[in-house]
Image (cartoon, grey):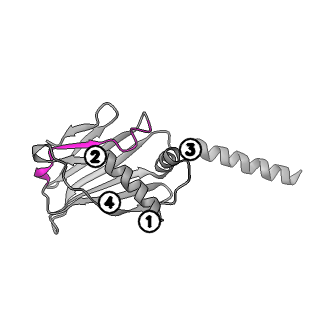
């Protein structure tokens, strides 16, 4: 009987923890120029469980983003879903810097070398919104100490920088 109570308590705790999982789907992206290098830096912060669910849905397997081959799969997805358009409607060359994986968030780092923010005209941001209908992506642009915010969703995948 005591074992039954312990198992029941463990099940209730597990069920309660899942009830507190995030109920919204949002990503945050920061865009700024590194004054030292002159590079345009892009930092995406995503919920780990959303990224895990996306990759499992796309490839029907579990991923460990600390392994280079699994990181490469996420890289390919991010590069397909996020880009910055410059003059003449051409995409600026975003380079993958890397990522950090934690229990709550996956943080992805990209950069466009030696590029001022003034060269960015339009941003396309479709990370996770192709998978999660209610996904929103907030992008903060930091320029000269001021911050501007753009909000992306399925209905607004591309927005002008200015």
Spot occupied by residue 47 in the image (x, y as percentages of width and height): 45, 50
| Alpha-carbon span between mark 4 and mark 3 | 28 Å
- Residue carrying label 1: 68
Q: Which mark is residue 11?
A: none
Q: Nearer the viewer, mark 1 or mark 3?
A: 1
Q: Nearer the viewer, mark 1 or mark 4?
A: 1
Q: Mark 1 or 4 closer to N-term? A: 1
- Residue carrying label 2: 139
User: Is 103 situated above or below 21?
Assistant: below
Q: Is 102 inside the magenta-drawn segment?
A: no
Instruction: Determine crowd level at label 4: few under 14, some 14-19, many 20+ residues with C-alpha closer than 10 A.
Output: some
Q: Residue shown at 50%/50% (left/top)? A: 52
Q: Is 120 inside the magenta-drawn segment?
A: yes
| Alpha-carbon span between mark 1 and mark 3 | 31 Å
Residue 32, image quadrant: bottom left
Q: Residue shown at 42%/55% (left/top)? A: 73
The single residue placed furthest to the right in the displayed view is 1
Is there CB contact under 8 Å for labels 1 and 4?
Answer: no
């Amino acid at each position: 009987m005591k074992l039954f109570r312990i198992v029941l308590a463990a099940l209730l705790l597990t069920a309660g923890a899942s009830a507190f999982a995030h109920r919204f789907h949002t990503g945050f992206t920061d865009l700024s120029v590194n004054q030292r290098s002159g590079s345009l830096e892009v930092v995406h912060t995503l919920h780990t469980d959303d990224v895990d669910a996306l990759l499992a849905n796309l490839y029907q397997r579990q991923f460990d983003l600390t392994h280079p081959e699994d990181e490469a799969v996420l890289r390919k997805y991010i590069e397909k879903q996020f880009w910055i358009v410059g003059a003449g409607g051409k995409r600026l060359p975003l380079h993958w810097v890397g990522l950090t994986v934690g229990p709550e968030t996956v943080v992805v780092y990209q950069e466009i070398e030696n590029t001022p923010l003034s060269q960015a005209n339009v941003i396309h941001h479709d990370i996770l919104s192709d998978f999660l209908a209610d996904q929103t992506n907030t992008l903060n642009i930091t320029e000269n100490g001021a911050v501007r915010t753009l909000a992306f969703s399925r209905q607004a995948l591309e927005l002008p920088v200015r």
